[in-house]
Image (cartoon, grey):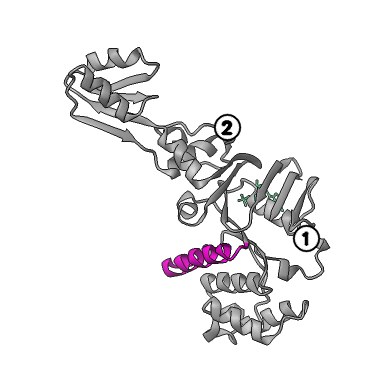
Amino acid sequence: MIEVNGLVKRYGEKTAVNGLTFTVRAGIVTGFLGPNGAGKSTTMRMIMGLDRPMAGTATVGGKAYAQWSAPLTEVGALLEARAIHPGLTARQYLLALGATEGIGARRVREVLDLVGLGGVADRRAKGFSLGMGQRLGIAAALLGNPRVLILDEPVNGLDAEGVRWVRTLLKDLAAEGRTVLLSSHLMSEMELTAEHLIVIGQGRLLADTSLAGFAERVAGGSVRVRSPEAVRLRSLLLGQGVTVSSDEPGVLTVTGMESDQIGAIAGRNGIILYELVPQRASLEEAFLELTGGAVEYRSPGARVDAAPVGAGRSRS
Ligand code: ADP
């Protein structure tokens, strides 16, 4: 379990992490999601004792990272921009890392095979592609067979096969009862891997919810209704506490009522419907809407406010 309580980190004028509190449970993959610059890496570095918080605490398995006598067996991490000496081979690097905690050649061979680097174990890291470097970083994180894994954007630089491999690996590791915290700025990545989401923007918590819960918010969207009697239907619906808008003749966008109920009202009043379609925003759109106000650098012309449904800005 990872517990983060009231974490704050400033760099000069810039507040990178602004009072974050959350818990990461064992047995599932938890996604740590936020736009670039949201404070994910900074938070992960503080959990790993690599950055000192200005306020608050972060513990792994009930202790601060520095208090673990054999930290590799408690928590393994892949953080951005891992520095690997380019002159070392993959095997030498892992042996050196393992030596600090009595982890030997056999385990090094195991993790190299596990991440698919068995065949290049004795090549120098300077010849490694970005993807191979990521795999070596994942091998390092797994070296001590840790109970907690913290991975910052682990699929960066991996090809499609590699991305699928990481996904399956993380889910398997979580299913074994480990705690897995995985960061990404892409909802699409989380959608396929994470069971729980912690969403941050500008260093603040925006949502702490199951993926299913996040999807439900999205599902509370609008319904598109097309009918030759749209005007009559509109007046019938308006008495029911819903919002009805219309951008084209004969088509209504109804918010605040399920499609079944709209269909029933139409049926009771003998109104023909040509279309009755719930409008579900994608999780990606809901994420963009949730973090829209918290994006540090926005692409020119990007319309983050264009998502068709409200995913609320409140915590769930
Ligand atoms: P994320 O991982 O979500 O992309 P980061 O934690 O890397 O976000 O960064 C959060 C904010 O803190 C950004 O505005 C970033 O520019 C700033 N920041 C991060 N590290 C440093 C640093 N070492 N010095 C100055 N500013 C930093």
Residue drawn at x 83%, y 62% is 67
Q: Position of residue 274 (x, y in %)?
A: 18, 29
Mark closest to the chain's N terminus, 2 or 1: 1
Q: Which mark is residue 65?
A: 1
Does the beta carbon of the residue at mark 2 sit less than 8 Å from ligand 1?
A: no
Q: How far separated are the C-alphas under marks 2 and 1?
A: 31 Å
Magenta residues, dominant SS class: helix
Q: Is residue 160 magenta?
A: yes
Check disc 2 and report the residue beneath it.
314
**Visible residue check, residue 299:** no
Q: Secondary structure at mark 1?
A: helix
Place residue 245 in its image quadrant: top left
Q: Is residue 202 left or right of residue 166?
A: right
Q: Is residue 178 above or below residue 129?
A: above
Q: Residue at 22% x, 19% y: name it.
A: 268
Q: What residue is rendered at 71% in x and 56% in y?
A: 45
Is 92 one of the magenta-colored residues? no
The residues colored magenta run 155-178
